[in-house]
Image (cartoon, rainbow, N blue to C red):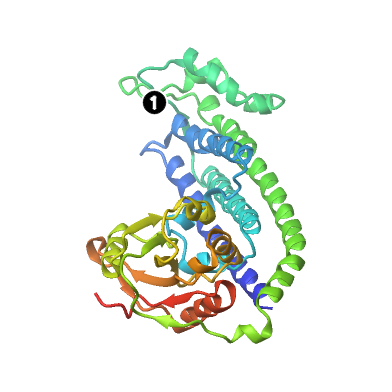
Amino acid sequence: MQENKDSLALRALSVMIALIAFILGLLASVAALSGDEYGRVNLLLSLFLFALLPAFGLLATAVFLSLGRRSGIAALLVELRVTPKRFATLLARQGGAAQRQEILFSISQGWLLSFAAGNLFGFALMLLTMDISFVWRSTLLDALDLLPALDFVAMPWSFWSAAQPSLEMLNQTQDFRLQGSPNDANYVGQWWRFLLAAQLCYSLLPRTLLWLIANNRRMRKTETLSTGLNQKIANENPISEIDRLAESVTEMPVDSILFDFAHTPDSLLSDIGERLQVTTIHKMPIDLHSQLQRAEYTNTQPLVVLVRSWEPPLAELADSLREGLTAEQQSNLFIAPIDWVSAPQKNERLIEPKVAHTQEWRRFCASAVDCTHLSLYGAKS
């Protein structure tokens, strides 16, 4: 039941962000097509927004898919903390890493599709309400230089002759400041067909197809993993273990080794290292297990793992810790959930995690890894 609520909340938040992307796309179109006081619009700038930028985006998507990375722009925005903190929290509750990757890919395509739809809506709105004259100017290029590039861009819709560029159109719509703007109405207004076809070909249609494919993969992945994941959670967290809380401490022996799994800001991480008097600080890569295998420390040396308090514990974290540590090393393991706020001049400071978050991590320490909970909020400065 909680999983369904989290999924619905994540979808609702994704729709809200998609609406913002739609508005941004609309505003980008309006800005690109506003033109000067004579209604002249830079054709090359419009071409960059409606054709080149979407084409590069599709190329980047293809490259990442070929490398097996499906996270997309949504993962980048989460990593940069542009999205609301609640979005990252809800996302972390969505099953395993493979399932979250499919969700991120689906959400990414939805946001990019919304931006493309906003572009097209703004484009249509400006064409209906404004008398737009598409012109172009360049110091380095002339019509003969530009035509091959435009012909290449227009290859996918070669069947639509009215939307094809021509040398005559380029000559008639080239703008020279000293000679005044072109005045042949038969040509200055015809570039809209070319730009419309570019949006449909390089932005709206491929993003719609990718969004449908991503949603289909997401649904199949969810159905496949749901039964197994629920069974795994039930086996790892029997009813008798759910309410058991791990011991919580505020002090620990010095000379510990610190693993930053929370992507803590550098200034704050340095302060935490000094407070705990650690010997080594490891900034965590994505693969925790590999990092633990590479780390060199004794069985008796305390090991502190920093995690974000607002993100719920994941089974993969427990698996990595159990696989990377011996039983003796696990007895010297401390999980430290942290939260922070950003002050002026980027001086972050620790704040006390919410009680509900602390309780959840203490249950994780007791049932999943059998380690100790460390409260940095109560640690001495």
Q: Which of 111 and 46 is in front in this view?
A: 111
Looking at the image, residue 85 lies above or below residue 372: above
Residue drawn at x 48%, y 66% as measured from the top left: 329
Q: Position of residue 331 (x, y in %)?
A: 48, 72
**How many dots with numbers?**
1
On-image quarter of the C terminus: bottom left
| 254 on left or right of 224 | left
Residue 22 in sight from this viewpoint: no
Q: Which of 303 and 81 is in front in this view?
A: 303
Q: Name the residue under label 1.
A: 181
Q: Where is residue 298 in the image (x, y as percent from the top left)?
A: 42, 60
Look at label 1 and name its amino acid: Ser
Q: Which of 253 and 267 is in front in this view?
A: 253
Looking at the image, residue 238 lies above or below residue 209: below
**View extreme (top): residue:** 144
| 45 on left or right of 341 | right
On-image quarter of the N terminus: bottom right
- Quadrant hosting residue 379: bottom left
Residue drawn at x 49%, y 56% as measured from the top left: 292
Q: Nearer the viewer, residue 341 or 187?
A: 341
| 115 on left or right of 302 | right
Q: Where is residue 5 in the image (x, y as percent from the top left)?
A: 64, 75
Question: Could you tell me which secondary element the residue under label 1 belongs to?
Answer: loop
Q: How crowded is mark 1: few (under 14 residues within 10 Å), some or many (20 or more)?
A: some
Q: Position of residue 362 (x, y in %)?
A: 50, 79
Residue 133 in sight from this viewpoint: yes
Residue drawn at x 56%, y 29% as measured from the top left: 190
Looking at the image, residue 306 lies above or below residue 46: below
